[in-house]
Amino acid sequence: MERKTVFKGRLLPYLLVAPQLLITIVFFFWPAGQAVWFAFLRQDAFGIRTSFVGLENFQDLFADPLYLETLRNTLVFAAGVSCIALGTALLLAVMADRQIRGAGLYRTLLVWPYAIAPAIAAVLWIFLFHPQIGMLGRALNGAGIPFDYKLNGNQAMLVVILAAAWKQVSYNFIFFLAGLQSIPKSVLEAAAIDGARPAYRFWTVTFPLLSPTTFFLLVVNLVYAFFETFGVIDALTKGGPGRATETLIYRAYIDGRVNLDLGMSSAQSVVLMLVVILLTAVQFRFIERRVHY
Amino acid sequence: MATLDLAGIRKSFGPVEVLHGVDLAVRDGEMIVIVGASGCGKSTLLRIVAGLESPSGGRVAIAGRDVTALEPAERDIAMVFQNYALYPHMTVAQNMGYGLKIRGLPRAEIERRVREAAALLGIEALLDRRPRQLSGGQRQRVAMGRAIVREPKLFLFDEPLSNLDAKLRVQMRAEIRRLQKRLGVTSLFVTHDQVEAMTLGDRLVVMHQGHAAQVATPMEVFERPADTYVAGFIGSPAMNFLSGRLAEGGRAVALGAGPLIRFADGPRPGQEGEPVTIGIRPEHVRPDPAGLALAIDLVEPLGSETVVHGRLPGGEALVVKLAGAAPRDGALAVALPPEALHVFRAEDGKRLDP
Ligand SMILES: Nc1ncnc2c1ncn2[C@@H]1O[C@H](COP(=O)(O)OP(=O)(O)O)[C@@H](O)[C@H]1O
Ligand SMILES: [Mg+2]
């Protein structure tokens, strides 16, 4: 049964949604529209004349080998973050689900990272990985393994992936735990009686039943890795060393704010927007198709 | 096919003991129904047999082998759950074949067995569907099928019919009985429904607060209930209980309601004047113009018979089931035939036999 509220006048409903609409327009559609518009313009070096250049910004962008390298970085970064954040969260959720009585405290502890600002999170990771002052960094160097994420690009990538994934684990954990708890206990018991050992049971019953949750989280994690990790990267590596940890979102910011190339930055923003739209569309399609067992 | 032996099964959840030592010996191919009110420990007992719970004390043996410490997987049993517990992401065929696949049977053999079981249950047309595309009755059959294909030593049923509507329940009840007889697999069937219990079981275990109050055939339980709990639980409307005292050296009872009734089958052991509870089933109470006056409170016509609720002179309630219609004038005189009386000790409710 669907319940509908019936308003008497025409005006009231519009008035009620107006604040929400206004906020969305001012803070999203307006800047987004501007970005799309700027993506087709180019300013001269002194910012005096602006001319319409059509798709030239986009052509330049995809012809730029540095941009393609950034794209590659982003893919590695996003894949790394998603895999680690999902895998760790699933492992923790399965452990919590088994001992659900202790889960209250466990859950609270695990949710903390999510509430920590990116800059503070980054400082924590600096304390861990800094080659001179970080616990792990010093230990590694002491053990004869040269470790300096400020010089070694691969190590830098590893550090930003870990830092970004760590923040997302809590969110994933909550969803995985809820997903696990919604699997009827009797189904797992039936599998046990059918002769399935715990590991086999997990891969043939639990995991498939979790797949809607996993897919939802995968998209959320990709979106997070693509668009919401600016703070972590800025605080930890500033895209360096070289461009080793420069991702699309980071470069869009550098081009716009630092290099003041609004046209190129806007073109990059448009590309990013398209990626979000694509991911969201995939998600909606999928959720409509299956998901509910 | 196998025997099942339970010896002194106890189970505590934290400080609360819910099973207080249950003994049971199930013969090969027998269908035992565990019946009792909700919360008396039926499911817990069944889950202990399945290995889903471990007992706090006692021993479970299947086919003579002690399995108390074994995992469910190692016990070679199959279970049908109340909510069916089908695997939602698998087709009917995959649901039924899951256990066989785990045992490493060749694919052709799995397919053959699944088809056979499906044919037996009339669900061949559903093999490619998923559980959510099935009705309650169909899910029930698939759950049965999943149990059958494994050809286990033991079937365990935990109230498998209680989620079905009344008509389907009766139909599935008969079908389960037929199937069990045909396959000859030793079975434990848990239910809170006394009709299900009476019709399905070779023998019943009537459970009461974590004890097995009586283990006997349905007719024995009905005709010679071991205590007042069993007597009141089996039979509908429930048995009447009247208070009285032993008289004439145990050869008769002096009812609180007035009359002295001589037992038809001999003297009961006990002191003169010892308090007893007399049980009589509503259908055994006879209208008799020379009998006790019954003040009628309520008449429930059921068509072919009528249930009359009333009070005896002493104020004790008595329910009478009459063939045909009730008397119209609001009064009824009844006799309590001596051969239909059950005698229980008032102190602990245990049956007293001659
Ligand atoms: N996992 C459990 N933890 C604590 N108490 C339980 C648990 N399972 C059952 N009980 C308790 O044990 C008693 C018997 O339960 P159960 O065997 O399910 O009864 P039945 O199946 O006869 O209705 C109930 O009082 C129930 O509350
Ligand atoms: Mg139960």
Image: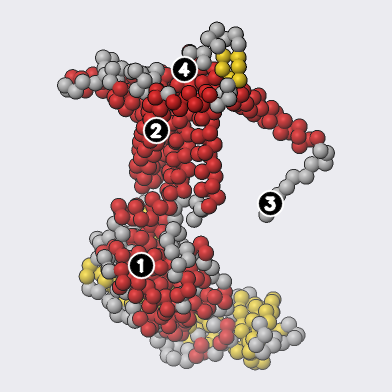
The picture places residue B287, in percent across and down from the top left corner, at 63, 90
| Residue receiving disc 3 | A2
The picture places residue A284, in percent across and down from the top left corner, at 54, 45
| Residue receiving disc 1 | B97
Count of numbered badges drawn on the protein: 4
State if disc 2 and disc 4 touch (CB < 8 Å): no
Disc 3 marks a residue whose amino acid type is Glu
Name the quadrant containing residue B319. bottom right
Q: Residue at x 27, y 68 (%)?
A: B105
Q: Residue at x 58, y 21 (%)?
A: A53
B234 versus B51 height, above or below: below
Q: Is residue A21 left or right of residue B11?
A: right
> Which-is-in-front pick, marks 3 and 4?
4
For residue A139, say whether it is visible: no
| Residue receiving disc 4 | A254
Q: Chain of mark 3?
A: A
Q: Is residue A140 left or right of residue A271?
A: left
Looking at the image, which is closer to me, A255 or A43? A43
Which of the numbered marks, if any, corresponds to residue A75?
2
State if disc 1 and disc 3 touch (CB < 8 Å): no
Image quarter in which the C terminus of chain B is found:
bottom left
State if disc 4 and disc 3 touch (CB < 8 Å): no
Disc 1 marks a residue whose amino acid type is Gly
